[in-house]
Amino acid sequence: MIAALATPLAQAGPVIPNFGRGDECIRNNGRFCMHWFLDNFGNRYVPRIIEHVEMTLIAISIGFVIAFGAALIAFRHERFELPFANLSALFYTIPSIAFFQIMVPITGIGWLSIEIALVSYTLLILFRNTLTGLREVPTEAKEAAEGMGLTRRQTLLRVELPLAAPAIIAGLRVATVTTISLATIAAFITPLGLGAPIFSAIQTGANTEFVSASILAIALALVADALIVASQWITTPWARARRSK
Amino acid sequence: MSELINFFIDNAGLLLDKTVEHIRISAIGIIIAVLIALPAGVALGHQHRGSYLAINISNALRALPSLALIAISLAFFGLSAINIQIALVALAIPPILTNAYTAVDRVDPDAVEAARGMGMTESQVLRGVELPLSWPLIFAGIRAASVYVIATTPLAAIAGGGGLGDIILNQATYKLSGVIAATIVTVVLAFAVDLLFAWVQRLVTPRGLVLPKEFHTIVPPTESDVPADTMAVAR
């Protein structure tokens, strides 16, 4: 098998690395060489972008489920608010670059450690916004629901949650851009996502490599931000109606 | 655990030095952000226009990943203290700008009108009525910004160095116990600053002004889409 593979290579002659290939910009270690970026975008950056999006989506989904559940509980039973708010605030003050490292001895190098840290950072914003949104529902709306004979559950599903949706989505928006930012730092423990080329290229000093990754990370965050704004516009027409008054 | 305690004992001097440096780096970032965002937010809020500008600048800055900013800055300035400051200022401006804007913009119009009726000039209205009523919310913004900044300052060690990040990013030298020790110091520092600003916030709150509950936690409600009343200053 190996011999079969080796034969064509041998026939092609010795493999000589083409050191002359870099254009002037790369040889001078320019800050951003468009040519190099375009040549390397497909094989170097696309996989990193996909990993980055995956990391973010997993963290936001799990974080949302936890924070949303906690907010619903705190909405009904106020005594649960402070413990959860304080715990998630504590997570928020831990420097991410330390959080990732501290998780390594506990859950190993890899996705689990990254996601535990990223999920922890989403909780505070998602919890606070969901709870604030639910509490800001006008009393008149709730009274109208009660007058119509809706049960508590129906009131929550048909009145309170739809009216809280803009605040909840605003929380998702901040949580998403924050997670995209923190996910770049996850590469400090394991080379995943757009942070990987940033950390490795800062070590080697290849300017254009880490500048490209940084620009992509910024673009990813801005695109995600815009997508959430657009989806909010489409999914909550009642919020538009209320605001335009 | 004992390793951790030993690290605190053996490296008390190092931790202290790095903490002082950490505070210095964070403070510079916060001060620059306040100098930029506070006048801008207050001016826009006073004129009740530019909400689109204030909110969108904030949203755009909030989206910028700190590590990416540090890396791009590194390519331009080399290893220097500027790199971390760019990331910290970008991080600190959004809460300060939006809170300053919202606070001044939402001051009770009756109070402002009464002040004008008494013959106050524009600057008297601003200094005598709008700002005093706005300080609590403005400080809530600075408070939130300070907590973010302190938790992000360790990234300084990537490009230029300084602060507790020198320990946190150097597990090879200081072992995990060193990383954890420096992390604990950072978290304590963040909470201390949070408490300090909570105290300042109470100090600058005019008597007779009742604050909504949101003022007492680390992250202020996000402005743009939360119903307006959430951010209201006073009734």
Image (cartoon, helix red, strand yellow):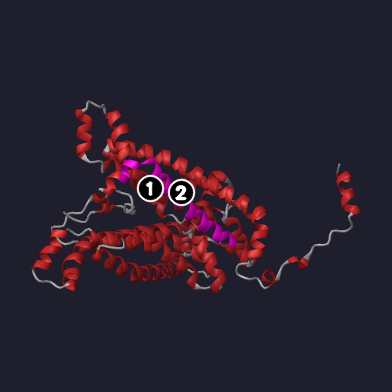
Q: Residue at x 31, y 49 (%)?
A: B226
- Residue B23, image x and y in percent? 40, 68
Question: Disc 2 or disc 1, which is closer to the eye?
Answer: 2
Is any part of residue A84 visible from this angle? no
Dominant secondary structure of the residues highlighted in magenta in the image: helix
Residue B112 among those drawn in magenta: no
| Residue B116 falls in image quadrant | bottom left
What's the amino acid at mark 1?
A: Gly
Q: Residue at x 52, y 61 (%)?
A: B68
| Residue A201 left/right relative to B48 | right
From which residue to which does the magenta span run?
Answer: A212-240
What's the amino acid at mark 2?
A: Leu
Q: Secondary structure at mark 2?
A: helix
Quadrant for the C terminus of chain B, please. Answer: bottom left
Label 2 crowd bin: few (<14), some (14–19), many (20+), radius 10 Å: few
The residue that mark 2 highlights is A227
Q: Secondary structure at mark 1?
A: helix
Whichever of callouts 2 and 1 sits on the residue coming sooner in the sequence is 1
Above or below, comparing residue A232 to residue B169 in the picture: above
The residue that mark 1 highlights is A171
Q: Chain of mark 1?
A: A
Is any part of residue A157 visible from this angle? yes
Nearer to me, A111 or A90? A111
Residue A222 among those drawn in magenta: yes
Q: Residue at x 55, y 61 (%)?
A: A214
| Residue A17 left/right relative to B226 | right
